[in-house]
Image (tube, rainbow, N blue to C red):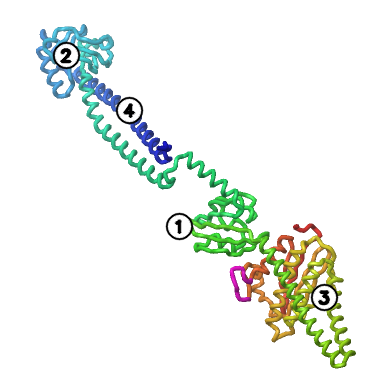
Amino acid sequence: MKNRRWSLARQLLALQVAGVGALVAVGAGLAYADASRATDDHARDEVVTVAHTIADTPTILAALSTSDPSAQLQPFAERVRADTGVDFITIMNPDGIRFTHPNPAEIGRRFLGNTAEARAGRTFTETYAGTLGPSMRAVVPVSGAGGQVVALVAVGITVKAISAELKERLIPLVAVAAAVLVVGMAGSFLISTRLRKQTRGLAPAELSSVFAYYEATLRAVREGLVLVGADGRVVLCNDGARELLGLTRDPVGTPVAELGLPPALAETFRAGEPRTDEIHVTDTRVLVVSTAPVQRDRGTVVTLRDHTDLQLLTGELQTTRGLAEALRSQAHEAANRLHTVVSLVEMGRASEAVEFATAELEIAQRLTDRVVGAVSEPVLAALLLGKAAEASERGVELVLTEDTALDDLDVEPRDLVTILGNLIDNAIDAAVENAAAAKPVVTVTARDHGGTLLLRVADSGRGVPEQRRGDVFDRGWTTKPQDGPVGHGLGLALVGQAVRRYGGTIDIGGEGGAVFTVRLPVRQGAAR
């Protein structure tokens, strides 16, 4: 069977038990030392107090003046000993000959212990092994009328008695230490159990490997991943998300509101409900955003995918389709005109057929010459011709102003198609919607104005209400019905994105209809 390493929870439990045990042992040792010192101090204070009290009693001096001091002092000492609970009281002369002793047989014999300091008039204490065994004792001098030392009083408590008192103190100490140890181990077990659930029983090395794989995965995926906490702050952001959002520093710990994101995107980050494949436009990218709330209201998981290239391809495809549709429309119109010419010839009206064909060719050639002569960029010229044909088919007149003139400019053709194509599409739609009130006309201006590319598109529609003009370039703003997850409301957002990328401006004006004016500082260096 494979020998599996201890899990992090088990290792932590062992460390905690060892730590709690060590702390309890050290605490118990210190408490024992303190109790032992306190017991010794108490015994020392007690024997000194009793000894001084006896030495100050007049009975001592009165008994010393008799021929047999022991006759009075022995009963007196035993009564005091019984009342105070000390183990012995020995009254002796300065030479150490006992007048009293708990064992009467020891009376008259020499005191076992040091008396030099007491004979010199000083009180002292010591632990000494006498006739009753080792004891804590105090020796106090008894002074006569002239101040000389006439007797000595020794009071002692045996070490055995002191140990018994210490043992009584240790019982609650041991109980408290045991209770602390049990509580500490129980707490460690509970913490270990919870940690085992959180770490799924993995060992530290396994957790380290999982974390390394997790880090590698987050860095490897191109999609963005952002975790937003319940407080609205970023908990995690991988490299892909930082690149997609244009963040220059690690945003972990930063509120979403302070990341500089578009309001709609920031609101999606904080959404409490799941959202799937929402399209959001930033200054540089088109993002597909999905969110999923974390269980127990812990925050939101946000995934980001770059939709920019796909959107550009889609735009180019739509432009190609538009051109193809324009060619189809022109082919359809050409077929109608050709049928008309053939019919006139068959009717014998050749001169009228020639006049009709020549007039139609002049109109078409005039528009083509006007566009090609004014616009040197072939993609933009093709766009304008295609939009003119599309507008004509929908009953809208597309007018290219006389001052339109564009040479080679430092602007990506696809960006010109994005900006001008979407503006013209919206203008045609607006003109068609208002056809009952005004002749459908779309006017286009494109020229170099002192190092600034000026693009202006005006229509005969109803215009944009002044209070709504600030919302026009937000993703999703539209007056058209939605037809899918991308739907309408994206074209003007892409226009705004392209203009911001070049550091340009876009204004909305007009009274009878909408007038969109774009200015791009292309001569100062465009974003390629």
Residue depicted at 26% across the width and 12% down the height: 118
| Amino acid at the residue labelled 4 | Gly
Depth check, front residue: 171 or 339:
339
Mark 1 and mark 3 lie on one chain; the one further toward the N terminus is 1
Residue 85 falls within the magenta-colored stretch? no
Mark 3 against mark 4, which lies toward the viewer?
Answer: 3
**Relative horizontal placement of residue 164, taking residue 479 as reference (left or right):** left
Q: Which residue is mark 2?
A: 61
Residue 485 falls within the magenta-colored stretch? yes
Mark 1 and mark 4 lie on one chain; the one further toward the N terminus is 4
Q: Residue 7 appears at what percent x and percent y?
A: 42, 40
Q: Which residue is mark 3?
A: 401
Mark 2 against mark 4, which lies toward the viewer?
Answer: 4
Q: Main secondary structure of the magenta part?
A: loop
* Secondary element at tag 4: helix
Marks 4 and 3: in contact by CB < 8 Å?
Answer: no
Mark 3 and mark 4 lie on one chain; the one further toward the N terminus is 4
| Amino acid at the residue labelled 3 | Thr
| Amino acid at the residue labelled 1 | Gln
10 Å neighbourhood of mark 3: few (<14), some, or many (≥20)? some
**Relative horizontal placement of residue 465, taking residue 401 as reference (left or right):** left
Q: Which residue is mark 4?
A: 29
Mark 2 and mark 1 lie on one chain; the one further toward the N terminus is 2
Mark 2 and mark 3 lie on one chain; the one further toward the N terminus is 2
Q: Residue 485 appears at what percent x and percent y?
A: 59, 68
Q: Dividing the image into 4 quarters, which one contains the C terminus?
A: bottom right
Mark 2 and mark 4 lie on one chain; the one further toward the N terminus is 4
Give the residues drawn in magenta, as a range.
Answer: 480-488
Q: Which residue is mark 1?
A: 295
Q: Residue 53 appears at what percent x and percent y?
A: 20, 21
| Amino acid at the residue labelled 2 | Leu
